Amino acid sequence: MDLITASFSIKTHDSQKTIRKIVDEKVHDHEDREDQDDPFFISDLGDIVQKHSRWKTLLPRVEPHYAVKCNPDPAVLTTLAALGTGFDCASKAEIQTMLELSVSPSRIIFANPCKQKSHLKYACDTNVSLMTFDNEDELYKVKRLYPGARLVLRILTDDTTAQCQLGLKYGCHPKHARYLLQVAKQLDLNVVGVSFHVGSGCRESSAYTKAIASSHDVFEAAHYIGYHMDLLDIGGGFPGQPSAPIAFEEFAEVINRALDEYFPVSCGVRVIAEPGRYFVASAFTLAVNVTAKRVVARDIKTFEVPESKDLVSNTVAPTKCEEPAYMYYVNDGVYGSFNCLLYDHASVEPTIMTDHSGEMEYSTSIWGPSCDGLDRIIEHTTMPELEVGEWILFKDMGAYTMCAGSEFNGFKRPVVYYVLPNNLRVPMHQMLQQENKEFKISTSNTKCTNYRGYFIEDAVGFAFEDADLFSHHPPSIDIRA
Ligand SMILES: Cc1ncc(COP(=O)(O)O)c(C=O)c1O
């Protein structure tokens, strides 16, 4: 059975089924797929639901405000909205998207310290009042365009070891904070709190401790100036995939300890965060098709070839040796979903779909589909020989991938197929129902066409079965908990 909304449908599956198996079925699902060799994503919304419940368990004091920029996929946003998170929006369009999903303005933080004027006016018109700033000019802008805004001072923290540093661009030096607060006070602006970002893909849990301690100092300075701030925003930076160098559990422990020390519950400060990759990285698996291949110079392992960075590339003519090397061309690349290699400093790991166990492995490089030499996904790895038409999987592809991908050279962005394990079907259905007042259970077999309504596919069979479930059996898993 599927859950169908106005903008996407979710296929439910046996909870034991692996994502690899789901990809395999999709590859062979010729009815459903228009161009059968096009790349596609499988998005496991159940993974997002599990992440949310893990967050609630491990960081109970911290209200997550999902960073929309990380992956603004409609099913991701709808699921998180239904789970009750808030949202970090950086632009008018992101705010608009969330308001259109019926998210209340009070659940949004406009977390861009340098805002375009028209975007700020839009925030004012739509009552999105909570927003960050980190410089004096922004205060004058806010005074002119949204004097009633609730301002959060973003401070600079040490992000030198993070996967992506943000401090080069944003954050006021803590020593400058007092001055900015004084200017804000003179302008009669309402500063309600402090925010920071330890860098995306944080690799040092102590970065949060230092940043929380710095925030505490700014709270004290603000108190001296006459502000009684009551909001701490600990930003993003949390790991999103199981292979991350530091586990989320460690971050949570360190953050809870620092909060207890510097912002104990008794101080009445509300704590929020802006996680992006945490919620989405592991929920998306990308399947790409090998569209072409090329044999190049022999394998480095058996011959004395000086180690070169461009090991497997088209620089040496093929030889008749028994160990060739291969270049594979696949149909998504750095101008598409793999832009994360450039922008997010990510590294990706291929998994071959077909079973090649026991076969000889060769030096291999993997390239994107565009006619640009920069479009290389993997410079060097070892793999068995693949045939054109085989599929390669890349897991943990949900963060900073599809959001910044282009259609350069005419290569379409991959479609997304949403899945959910069966045991989450009823609670997800209920959540969507609660979140969207216009929810309806279809009484016909027609698929969803209703404006913003949620439908159950094949309603004659399914809706009645579930209507019964709703009235007599509470869901076995409370996924909002
Ligand atoms: C202001 C802000 N908040 C939150 C995030 C999300 O960070 P992450 O994905 O590391 O959690 C970002 C990412 O760039 C950001 O710029």
Image: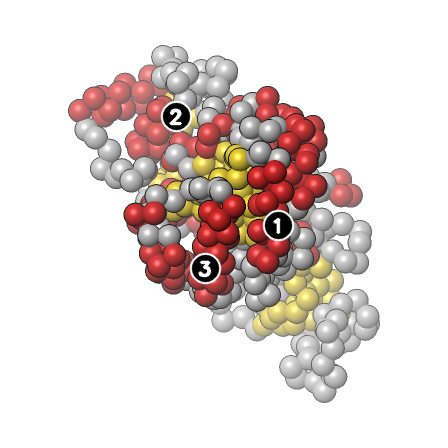
What's the residue at 79%, 58% (across, down)?
373
Looking at the figure, which quarter contains the C terminus? Answer: top left
Q: Is residue 440 above or below residue 233?
A: above
| Three-letter amino acid code of the residue under disc 2 | Glu
Secondary element at image label 3: helix
Q: Nearer the viewer, mark 2 or mark 1?
A: 1
Specify few, some or many for label 1: CA neighbours under 10 Å numbering under 14, 14-19, or 20 or more.
Answer: some
What's the residue at 56%, 31% (across, down)?
149
Secondary element at image label 1: helix
Location of residue 218 in the rendering, given as x and y in whole percent from the top left corner: 50, 53
Q: CA distance from mark 2 to mark 1?
A: 43 Å
Which residue is nearer to you in this view: 158 or 478?
158
Secondary element at image label 2: helix
Between disc 3 and disc 2, whose residue precedes? 3
Specify few, some or many for label 3: CA neighbours under 10 Å numbering under 14, 14-19, or 20 or more.
Answer: some
Circle 3 residue: 213
Specify few, some or many for label 2: CA neighbours under 10 Å numbering under 14, 14-19, or 20 or more.
Answer: some
Q: Nearer the viewer, mark 1 or mark 3?
A: 1
Which residue is nearer to you in this view: 47 or 130?
130
Between disc 1 and disc 3, whose residue precedes? 1
| Three-letter amino acid code of the residue under disc 1 | Tyr
Circle 2 residue: 435
Q: Is residue 299 above or below residue 46?
A: below
Between disc 2 and disc 1, whose residue precedes? 1
